[in-house]
Image (tube, grey):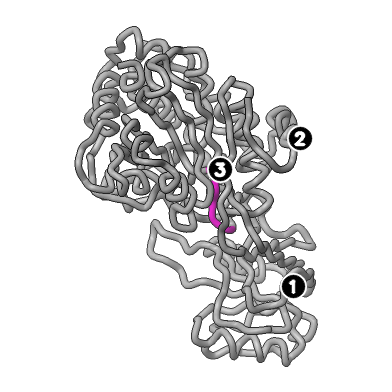
Amino acid sequence: MTDRSGLSRRGLLGAVAGVTAATALPTAPAWATDDQRPGAAHRPKLDRYDRQIVSGLSSDRALQHLRVLSEHIGPRIGGTRSEKRAADYIAGQLDRYGYHTRLEPFPVADKFTAQIEDVRDILPNDLCWQAGAAPGGKLDVTVEGPVRDVGPATAPVWPADVAGAIVIADDTSAARPALVAEAAARGAVGVILLPADLVFPRRASAFQPGGLTNAPIPVVGVAQVQKRLIREALAVVNSLPLRISTTSHRGLISNNVIGERRGQGGPDSPIVVVCGHYDSVIGAPGANDDGSGTVLTMELARVFSRIPTKATLRFALWGSEEQGLIGSRYHVAQLDQTQRDRHAAVFQNDMVATSWDPAITYWLLSFTGLANTATDAVRAAGVRLGYDPQMVGPVQRGASDHQSFQEAGIASANFSWRGEISPAFLEPPYHSPEDTIAKNVSLERLQVSMELIGTAAYAVARS
């Protein structure tokens, strides 16, 4: 049964079958239940409860959901129509699994996005070409023109043929207003601002340029990889015409998606939550961040739909995490103390499937830095699955939705594959247009993550 309002989500229920094989897909894992997993220290030592979970999991099924979210829908910016389409799709799947599913709406700030189109089809099309639009620039318009590179915004070199062109420049916030004003005065139809390169493995994300007021032309901020590709194209072609469309998204409502099944322990039974966030940043398809945590949650919901538990199960996907944990904080704020006290463990999954080779460590991240029911259960699951040497933590770190729960005294942690140096050592496609299935997803890591969280959650939920 579903408790919700808004547009019908039936149109996306069949989207899995409708998504075409537009990109090369990662290889699905082929191990049997008792096989040693890649990178594991030893063969698994599973009990009968673990086997119920592990034998039912399908990374292929999770991949189908991920293709809908990151390819068919694409960037899922908090409160925008694309995020709502994703919410409706997720809720529709939870409906099918038999959960009492509801959307939990809350307001979020306005967003300003841009879409860059390559008129001559010169630029690579295997990444996202969404960018941020300046709130103080021209919005809800489409312009087209050849690209003209003027170099640094602090000391631009203006060619003679700027009129009717789209100007690109290396961005500096202090020089931004003067550059845009000069470009408009010279007849440019738009400005693309290029970010400074970050130190590897970080890459700059797309951004909404600030500091402008009533600029007469659209101004957009691109990601580092988009900057590189545009300049590489300019180096080998005589003309690179682009089309830029800007969109303002105002009066926005984001949603948490929550599927619940009451436990056999009755209305006051403990609550076990498995969750992730389904939104993404501007300019990023969000395949790993956090499409991977989203589809892990969805696949575990499917498997648990056939398994009775003493605890009440909640499978939750948070909206607008990327804007500051807004959705999960809203959810926790609605819980009275009795509800908070019933929470036995919250398993938050954020970035659980990157294919980046150095991300060999499975981090147990606690906002307090202390162990709790969630970290203990996942650590024990790692021992049974043979992954204990690759697990580090609990380590003190917030910045994902587990923080919202731990701030309220609820046992929670975030679980993620990251580089072994520190949990801040994230893959280069992080928050970038290259966070795609083909460029940034390992089904092996996703499968292991599902097994770890699934067996850990079951251990808590059945006791």
Quadrant housing residue 240: bottom right
**Dot 2 alpha-carbon crowd within 10 angstroms: few under 14, some 14 to 19, many 20 or more:** few
The label on residue 11 is 2
Residue at 79%, 72% (x, y): give it: 143
Residue 124, compared with residue 155, is above or below; it is above
Mark 3 or mark 2, which has the lower sequence index? 2
In the displayed structure, does residue 349 sit left or right of residue 19?
A: left
In the displayed structure, does residue 118 sit left or right of residue 275?
A: right
The label on residue 238 is 1
**Dot 3 alpha-carbon crowd within 10 angstroms: few under 14, some 14 to 19, many 20 or more:** some
Amino acid type indicated by mark 1: Asn
Q: Which residues are magenta?
A: 278-282
In the displayed structure, does residue 75 sit left or right of residue 217?
A: left
Nearer the observer, 279 or 314: 314
Residue 390 position, x and y percent, is: 26, 33
Foreground mark, 1 or 3, reads: 3
Q: CA distance from mark 1 to mark 3?
A: 51 Å
Residue designated by label 3: 104
Nearer the observer, 81 or 74: 81
Q: CA distance from mark 3 to mark 2?
A: 21 Å
Q: Quadrant of the C terminus?
A: top left
The label on residue 285 is none
Residue 335 part of the magenta segment: no
Residue 279 part of the magenta segment: yes
Q: CA distance from mark 2 to mark 1?
A: 43 Å
Mark 2 or mark 1, which has the lower sequence index? 2
Asked if labels 1 and 2 touch by Cβ distance under 8 angstroms, the answer is: no
Residue at 71%, 69% (x, y): give it: 237
Residue at 35%, 21% (x, y): give it: 461
